[in-house]
Amino acid sequence: MNKATVAPAPIGWRYIILLALLLGAQPVATDLYLPALPALARELGNPSLTMTAMMLSFGIAQLFWGPLSDRYGRKPILIIGALGFSFCGLIGATVDSMNSLVLARIAQGVSLAALIVCARATVRDLFAPIDGMRVLSKGLSGLGLIALLSPILGAALATFSPWRGAVGAIGVYGLVLLLWVVFGYRESRPTASAEASSLSHWQAMKQVARGPKFRAWTALATASYATLFCFLLSSAFVYINAFGFTPMQCGIVLALNCVFYIAGTYFCRFLLRRMAPHRALKFSSVFSLSSGWLILIVALIWQPMAWVMIVGQCLFAVGHGVAQPTAQAGAIADYPEHAGRAASMSGFVMMITAYLVGQLISPHLGDNAWPLIIAMAVGGTAVTLISWTCVQRAYAGE
C-alpha cells in the first residue's frame, strides 16, 4: 500500500458519524432555512443572493483551504471552519438588513469550505479509492438524513420565528461540530502527504488538473450538484407560490427528496459491491435522465403538476445518491499526497458552476415552475451524457 494511504487514526462508526456531520454542514447551511425564504423575502427583500453568494464564497475558499490542509493537517483547518461556521450563523440571526445577512452568509461559506474540503480529504487519507467510495457513500447517507431533517426543522422554526430561528439554528449546528472536532477527531493526514505538499503548489495543481479521471468525475459531480442546486434554490417558490403548498408541506417535499437520496447512497454501495464505479454510473444515470424528461414532457403536454415534479425529483435524487459518492471519491482517488488540493479543486468547479446556474435561474423565480422544469431536463441530460462518455473514456483499457 502507498505510504500516503496508511491510516494513523482508528476507523469505525465514530469516523463515519463525524464524516456525516461534517458533510451535513452543507445541507444545514442551505436546506434548513429554505421554508423560511418567502418570509425572509417579505421582511428583507429577495433572498436568493443569501444562497448564491454563500455558494460563491464556498467554492472559491476551497482553493485556499485545500493546500493548507495538505500542509498543516486537517484538524486545525476543521477547528477554524467550525468556529467560523457557528459564529456567522449566530450573527446572521441578529441582522436587520439583507446586505448584512449576505455578508454573514459569505463568511459562512468560507468557513463551510474548510469543513467540506477536509471531510473529503480524510476519506482519501484513510482509505483506498474503491473503499473510499463506499465509505463516502455512508457519510453521504448521513448527510441525507441531516438534509431530511433540516427542512422539517426549518419549517417548524418558521412557524414560530419567520426566519431568524432557522439562521440561528445553523450557528448552533456549528457549535456541535466544533466540540466534536476538538474532542473527538484525531489527525488523519499521513506524514507522507505533508512531505509531498512541500512541492510547488502550482505543479501539484497542474498534476491534479491534468488527470483524466479527475476531470471526468469532477464534471459528473458538477452537473449533478448544479441540478440539485436549482431544485434547492427554487423549491420554496415553486411549491409555495406556484402550487400553493404551506411551508410545512414544502418541507415535507424536501424531506421526501432526501429519503430517495439516502436510498440512492445505499444503491451506490449495492452497485459498487458488484461492479466497477464507471459501470455503476451507467445504471444510475437512467434515473437522472428519466427524472427531467418526465417532468418536461408532462408539462408540455398538459401543464406543470406538483405530483409529477415530486416524482421526477425523487428519481433524480436516487441518481444523485450514486453520482456524488463515486464522483467525489473518484476525483481525488489518484492523488493521496494531494487529497486536499484535489478535493478543493473539484469542489471549486462544482460550487462556481452552481453559483452561475443560480445567477441564471434566480431572476425568474416567483410563481412559475418552468425555470425548475427546464433546469431538471437539462441537468439530467448532462449527467447522463457525462456518465456515458467522459467517465467511460477515463477508464478505457481497465
Image (cartoon, helix red, strand yellow):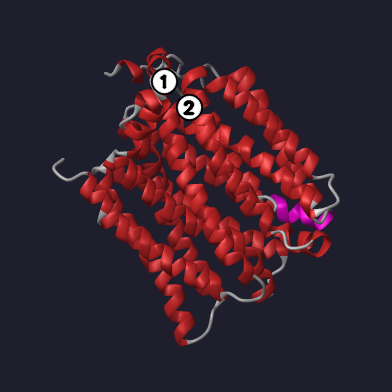
The quarter holding residue 94 reads top right
Region of the chain picked out in magenta, as a range: 153-160
Residue 396 among those drawn in magenta: no
The quarter holding residue 338 reads top left
- Which residue is at the far bottom? 302
- Which residue is at the far left? 397
Give the image location of residue 192, x and y in percent.
37, 14
- Mark 1: amino acid: Ser
Element at label 1:
loop
Using the image, determine if residue 300 lies above or below residue 314.
Answer: below
Mark sitting earlier along the chain (1/2):
2
Marking on residue 197: 1
The quarter holding residue 292 reads bottom left
Q: Are marks 1 and 2 in contact (CB under 8 Å)?
A: yes
Spatial separation of the CA atoms under disc 1 and disc 2: 7 Å
- Mark 2: amino acid: Pro
Label 2: few (<14), some (14–19) or many (≥20) C-alpha neighbours in 10 Å: many
Instruction: Give the residue displayed 55% in from the left and 72% down from the top.
Output: 371
Give the image location of residue 323, x and y in percent.
38, 49
**Residue position for label 2:** 67
